[in-house]
Amino acid sequence: MLGNDPVLLTPGPLTTSPATREAMLRDWGSWDAAFNRITQSVCADLVQIVHGENDYVCVPLQGSGTFSVEAAIGTLVPRNGCVLVPDNGAYCARIVRILERMGIAHVALPLGEDEPATAAAVEDALNRDSRITHVALVHLETSAGLLNPLDAIAAVCKRHGKRLIVDAMSSFGALPIDLRDGGIDAVISASGKCLEGVPGMGFVIVRRTLLEECAGRSPSLALDLHDQYVYLRKTAQWRFTPPTHVVAALRHALDRFAAEGGQPARGARYTRNCAVLIEGMRDLGFEPFLRPDVQAPVIVTFHAPRDPAWRFADFYAAVREAGYILYPGKLTQVETFRVGCIGAIDANEMHNAVAAIGRTVAALGLHVR
């Protein structure tokens, strides 16, 4: 299936199917009616995945997922708002940096890198600080693979009348997200994650009535979600040059997603991949950083061996030579590395990856246990 290319065991970009890559071989006119229909169908399918058909709209945006996170915050949070950010990793910290750059007041809820946010902690923070108008939650903190309890936190926000913006970059399509309960105002993700498209397009699925209140609010022209939404609705076209090949690939990836069985089937495949990975790595002596109850089936962080000979760069290069690309650790307190479970791969490929890692450990003479 993959030819001679290495398999990406990363959280995105990830290994895509040959057919998805093939979808990029045709050129599209950015104002052409056929391309406009692709955009419309992609947006409709994305909204349907999270059950937002009646009250939510999808606004696509050029660029990486972070572009869309910044666009959502800049458009949906008024300048006199105050955002609570449960902070248990690098992508939570990135939201804090965005808020700082925009001059928007914020309150960080500091947590350990292995500690999920809880509904009780969020509720306590809301009770302590009446300034808070919004909560920005990273659903799956990719720096460790940590899953935060979205539904419980959404219920708290709904009860307190606070807007909830969800960074679902690494969970959208793999884990259940349901907008019908009304506690979530916006969900953000990107093409090159669990939908198994290629990188280059982000999107925000946002409550329609909220977005329509946000004219002129964004401090950025390019990242103005309201302006993008209005222009798309009026013309069926993107305001600026769209990533046409990326959108076409995502159209094909969404067709594959539906044929596989949608989110339940995609999540089940990733869960099997994750279980095979953890079991096999444990047999080699590698221990996961997270407890099983907070580990999401998307990317797994492993403790690095304590062997003085350990160098991630050497390990990475040897595993890559064996056909697999790993990810460096992104934690601040302990030395780790990460292995992704997502992409157009299955449990058999995970068995092969573990075997390649085992051969690498032996070849480098590492003592893992």
Image (tube, rainbow, N blue to C red):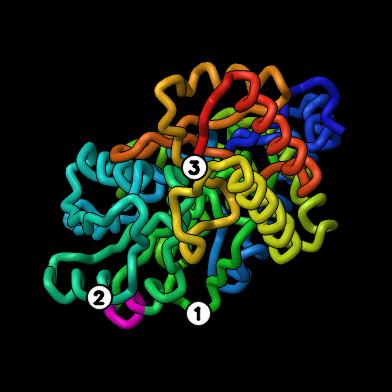
Kindly identify which residue carries mark 3. 302
Residue at (59%, 69%) from the top-left corner? Answer: 52
Up/down of 298 relative to 247, above or below: below
Kindly identify which residue carries mark 1. 181
> Gap in Å between the C-alphas at discs 1 and 3?
36 Å
188 and 228: which is toward the camera:
188
143 and 216: which is toward the camera:
143
At label 2, the amino acid type is Glu
Check disc 2 and report its element: helix, strand or loop.
helix
Up/down of 267 relative to 143, above or below: below
> Please, what is the dominant secondary structure of the magenta stretch?
helix
> How dense is the environment of label 1, judged by Cα within 10 Å: few (below 14), some, or many (20 and up)?
few
Question: x, y percentage for residue 234?
Answer: 58, 50
334 and 82: which is toward the camera:
334
Of circles 2 and 3, the one toward us is: 3
Which residues make up the magenta segment?
156-160
Of circles 1 and 3, the one toward us is: 3
